[in-house]
Amino acid sequence: MEVYRIVSEKFANKLQASGLANRWNKKGQMVIYAGSSRSLSTLELIAHRSGILLNHSYKVMIIRIQSEAGLIKEVKKEHLPTNWRSMDALASLQSVGSKWYQQKESLVLKVSSIIIPQEYNYVIHTEHPAFKSSVRLVGKEDFLFDQRIL
């Protein structure tokens, strides 16, 4: 399976996590977020950034994940709180992701996108035992934002 992550060019040479808190993880938990498509990854980047620098160099990271049984756990929408798409649910979703992270339930947590719930984001656990053998950066592409979407 291939997933996509858009980053500043200086961060595009290796798979690394920042440890910053996000929707599905708490601070200090080393995960990488990626989208199921380049277009979803674009929308996610725009939604999570306070501003996109048009003269800044971005890259699309193409990440290959082995999709063997047990490496990917999906969080089903029916198991989420009714307000899961709102900021009010942040603590609840971080709790779900933090439990997954601490227990190393799987290498990847597959979650519905807040922006497009019919599409998926993938939270990759960089400290899972299978990370080094099952996740690879297989390509990088230049990425230019179309000014019309900003």
Image: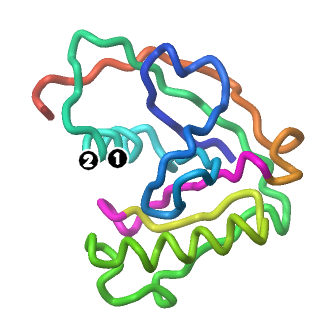
| Residues at circles 2 and 1 in contact by the CB criterion of under 8 Å | yes
x, y percent for residue 76: 54, 81
Q: Position of residue 92 (x, y in %)?
A: 44, 80
Q: Position of residue 124 (x, y in %)?
A: 65, 51
Residue 122 is a magenta residue: yes
Disc 1 marks which residue?
A: 44
Real-space Cα distance between discs 2 and 1?
5 Å
Element type at mark 1: helix
Is 139 or 33 nearer to us in this picture? 33
User: Could you tell me which residue is drawn at 30 percent across and 73 percent down?
Assistant: 85
Q: Amino acid at mark 1?
A: Glu
In the image, is 124 to the left or to the right of 78? right
- Which span is picked out in magenta? 114-127
**Crowd rating for badge 2 (residues with CA inside 10 Å; few <14, some 14–19, many 20+):** few
Would residue 87 appear left or right of 72 to someone viewing this image? left
Q: Amino acid at mark 2?
A: Ala
Name the disc covering residue 47, or none. 2
**Residue positioned 55% across, 38% down in the render:** 18
